[in-house]
Image: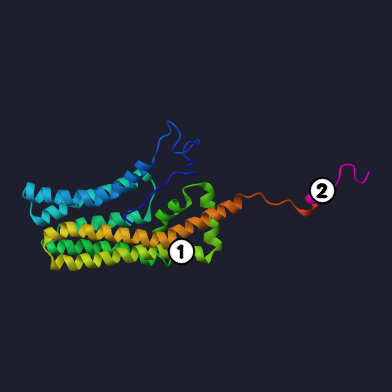
């Protein structure tokens, strides 16, 4: 799950209705949202792969140097996200630390296979920390899960908080979401370490990215179906229940039912 999202507040109307996607002249942000969701994948996977081959085959860099320099862009993107958001995101900060440690280790690693294994080993820290965070009050993956489930609305946020305090089923789903993502990322790292020492380096440069994409898609499918979707329905139901007007009390009902002039 590189690996975080945002959704617009509110519910889209039907085509042709005010506020809907079918309204003449109304902007359709669906395509833009899809493109934004692919930006982390392009920056963290596509650019490093392309820069590795350009530096190695085009500029004659050594394999070690090409691997090292190709990992700079993802680290800079994480820094930019932290600066632009102006708030500390636990998962983004963890990824930044992992990237910085990886770049520092690159300076002392002289073997390409060791560098690739090192990157996977250091990255596995992310999966381990996510799994450990499940035992805390706020699992790390919750930062990306909550906006997706609540749609960023005030009513959704309030419903989330109530369910988190009152529903054991909701809390288990929140933790299971992080367990699935942590397990997927840790498994991916183990497979990449094995591949780093059993396959050619040039093969692992692109195959490692394929492994990452597969791990992300698998985590999205499993965590979405078993956690995010049920939680979204629970939040919607809770928000709807809270929005319903409270029924009038017995005294008020009796007063309304009393004929005009009764008792005079």
Give the quadrant of residue 189.
Answer: bottom left
Q: Is residue 128 visible?
A: no
How far apart are labels 1 and 2 at the CA level? 47 Å
Query: Where residue 16 sits in the image (x, y, percent)?
Result: 48, 36
Give the quadrant of residue 127.
Answer: bottom left
Query: Where residue 85 sits in the image (x, y, percent)?
Result: 37, 45
Q: Residue at x 56, y 62 (%)?
A: 166
**Is residue 258 within the magenta segment?**
yes
Query: Where residue 31 sits in the image (x, y, percent)?
Result: 35, 42
Q: Residue furthest left?
A: 60
Q: Secondary structure at mark 1?
A: helix
Query: Where residue 244 sits in the image (x, y, percent)?
Result: 63, 50
Magenta span: 253-264
**Circle 1 residue:** 173
Q: Nearer the viewer, residue 38 or 142?
A: 38
**Circle 2 residue:** 257
């Amino acid at each position: 799950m590189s690996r975080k999202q945002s959704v617009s507040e509110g519910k889209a109307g039907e085509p042709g209705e005010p506020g809907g996607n079918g309204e003449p002249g109304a902007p359709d942000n669906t395509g833009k949202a899809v493109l934004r969701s692919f930006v982390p994948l392009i920056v963290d996977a596509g650019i490093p792969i392309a820069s590795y081959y350009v530096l190695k085959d085009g500029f004659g860099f050594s394999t070690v140097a090409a691997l090292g320099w190709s990992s700079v862009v993802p680290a800079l993107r994480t820094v930019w996200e932290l600066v632009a958001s102006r708030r500390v995101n636990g998962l983004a900060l963890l990824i930044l630390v992992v990237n910085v440690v990886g770049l520092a280790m690159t300076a002392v690693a002289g073997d390409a296979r060791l560098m690739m294994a090192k990157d996977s080993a250091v990255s596995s820290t992310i999966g381990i920390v996510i799994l450990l965070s499940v035992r805390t009050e706020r699992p790390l993956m919750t930062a990306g899960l909550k906006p997706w489930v609540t749609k960023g609305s005030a009513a959704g946020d309030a419903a989330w908080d109530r369910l988190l305090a009152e529903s054991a089923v909701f809390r288990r789903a929140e933790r299971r979401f992080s367990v699935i993502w942590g397990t997927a990322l840790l498994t991916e790292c183990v497979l990449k370490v094995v591949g780093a020492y059993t396959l050619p380096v040039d093969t692992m440069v692109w195959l490692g990215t394929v492994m990452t994409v597969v791990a992300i898609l698998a985590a999205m499918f499993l965590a979405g179906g078993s956690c995010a979707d049920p939680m979204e329905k629970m939040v919607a139901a809770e928000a709807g229940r809270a929005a319903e007007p409270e029924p009038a009390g017995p005294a008020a009902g009796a007063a309304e039912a009393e004929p005009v002039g009764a008792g005079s």
